Amino acid sequence: MPTYKDAGVDIHAADDAKKIFQKSLDRGDPRVLNSVGAFASLVQGKFDGYEDPVLVLKTEEPGSKQKLAFGHGYIPSICFDTVNHLINDIAVMGAFPLYVQDAIICGKLEKAMVVKIVDGFAKACEEQGCALVGGETSEQPGVLEPGTYILVANIVGIVERSKIIDGSKIAEGDLVLGLASHGLHTNGFSLVRSLLAKHPSLLQEKIDGEPFLSALMKPHRCYLSVLKDLFSHTGIHGMAHITGGGIGGNLNRILPPNLNAEIDLSTIDIPTIFKRLREIGSVPDDDMLRTFNIGIGLTLVVDPDAVSEIQMHLASHHVNSSIIGIIEKGEQKVTFKGALRY
């Protein structure tokens, strides 16, 4: 008679993997009250130092970058991508990360691979002061091909209600600071993979002295370490994480209804990798702006009187920044002037 294993699902392999990656999950964090094997994760709900705590939740996945990551062995890197993206999404609201859960969906569970993934997630969380508290591993033969993995994760963060940063304080005359990215982060990879399919020789090239693939696969930059000391700064009126949709599709999400952000494209220092992608694919500038961060991983909307102080703080944490725009009267839109400098 056919067994579940004959159908493609090996429960024993999954159990063996869980025994191994329990070491990655059990890192001695006192906020985590149980471990692998329970039906759900128990975490501490006491938040010392908060008078009116608000929980901040987000779910994210690293997009089609993960196909390149698994195809070329960038496993820990794609885990850092996922976690760092999540943390940035809540940090721009003034929140600190607490707990992360992951989901690993695969066509065939390979014990060594799953253990490596969980360990990558755990290390990425530990680096930013939060805890990986469990998740789900799902083997789905016939739905996904063997060797195919899909990663998803969600995060719980916390912020004092009175300190939520939501853009409501943005005012006419505020300046927009652009914080440098580490390259593509986790967006635009469907276009990148299309270009690589047409021009495979790209992988033999170097970008600023490093292999093209290495430049592509740099992990999504996490801005928490530089932002956390600015959460209470009265000069910070809004923050936007620049992901899919580019500057235009993300900065507009925090603008009040009666204001626009005008971005001067000529002020943006575009990394070489974006220039090469544009050149090899003859990608129109409008597409570049909608698809990629073009070198700006996060924007701050800042009181003009605080710009100098905030830029000094960013520089002290080795984050390059520049004034790329201004807030004007409008209709909650991001407008552009000038031209991209390639």
Image (cartoon, rainbow, N blue to C red):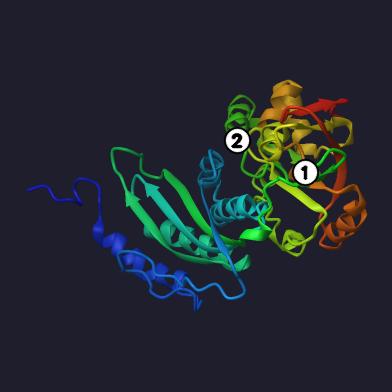
Q: Vertical placement of 165 versus 192: above or below? A: below
In this picture, residue 17 sits left or right of residue 261? left
Q: Secondary structure at mark 2?
A: helix
Residue 12: x %, y % from top left: 25, 62
From the viewer's side, name the closer residue of 340 and 12: 340
- Report which residue position mark 1 lands on: 170
Q: Residue at x 62, y 59 (%)?
A: 161
Residue 66 % position (x, y): 53, 44
Whether residue 91 is situated above or below residue 44 in the rendered picture = above
| 163 vs 126, nearest the viewer | 163
Q: Is residue 109 at least partly visible in the picture?
A: no
Q: How many marks?
A: 2
> Residue at position x 58%, y 65% from top?
52
Q: Amino acid at mark 2?
A: Phe
> Which residue sits furthest left?
1
Quadrant for the C terminus in the image: top right
| Residue 62 at x, y percent in the picture | 54, 45
Residue 189 circle label: 2
| Residue drawn at the location 68% of the way across and 29% of the way down | 290
Observer-side mark, 1 or 2, equals: 1
In screen coordinates, is 282 left or right of 337?
Answer: left
**Picture quadrant where residue 223 is located:** bottom right
The residue carrying pointer 2 sits among few (fewer than 14), some (14 to 19) or many (20 or more) residues within 10 Å by Cα, namely many
Residue 32 shows up from this direction: yes
Work out whether 288 lies above or below 296: above
Where does the image place residue 254, in percent across and percent down from the top left?
A: 69, 41
Mark 1 or mark 2, earlier in chain? 1
> SS at mark 1?
loop
Task: Give residue 324's quadrant in the image.
Answer: top right
Q: Is residue 221 left or right of residue 70?
A: right
The amino acid pointed to by label 1 is Ile
